[in-house]
Image (cartoon, helix red, strand yellow):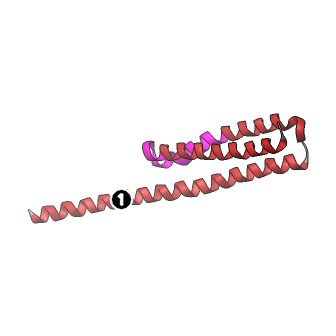
Amino acid sequence: MELSTLLVLYYVYLLGIAILSGLAGYYVMKKKAKAKGFMALFSLSAPLFLVLIWWFNHMSTNDFIGTKTWVSHLLTGLSIYFFYLLVSWIFFTCLVKRFHHDITSDIVVNEKEADNHNEAL
């Protein structure tokens, strides 16, 4: 495989892992447990990222393994992955806080409506 094609596929697959695990984490947060969204994202993205590193290593063995270019692309992918995890953690933390605030404000509103209804009776 040509070197430029291999690098493009490496970054496209990295983007695909981010999108797939992000959607899975969001689904878990919305449907299952609010606080478990990031854990679902990490549980899916970490093994997929390790498979991607293995694939990149396997495909690039004949072309440029061990060179500065190979190491720089490997470190760039690792940096992008850790930045993605940081941004995802912040995103899911903010969403969980917002959902928790919405739920508690609904409870307060419902209690006030119940008080108003009881006073009207």
Q: Residue at x 53, y 56 (%)?
A: 93
- Whether residue 65 is visible here, answered yes or no, is no
Quarter of the image where one finds residue 45: top right
- Extreme-right residue of the structure: 67
Q: As rendered, which of 49 and 11 lies closer to the eye? A: 11
Q: Quadrant of the C terminus?
A: bottom left
Three-letter code, disc 1: Thr
Q: Is residue 101 magenta?
A: no
**Where residue 69 sits: x, y (%)?**
87, 49
**Where residue 57 sits: x, y (%)?**
81, 37
Q: Is residue 87 left or right of residue 6?
A: left
Q: Write down the residue under mark 1.
A: 104
Span of residues in magenta: 29-46
Dominant secondary structure, magenta? helix
Q: Is residue 38 magenta?
A: yes
Q: Is residue 37 left or right of residue 50?
A: left
- Extreme-left residue of the structure: 121
Task: Note whether 119 is above or below 5 in the view shown.
Answer: below
**Where residue 7 sits: x, y (%)?**
78, 45
Task: Note whether 53 is above or below 77 in the view shown.
Answer: above
Q: As rendered, which of 11 and 27 lies closer to the eye? A: 11
Q: Quadrant of the N terminus?
A: top right
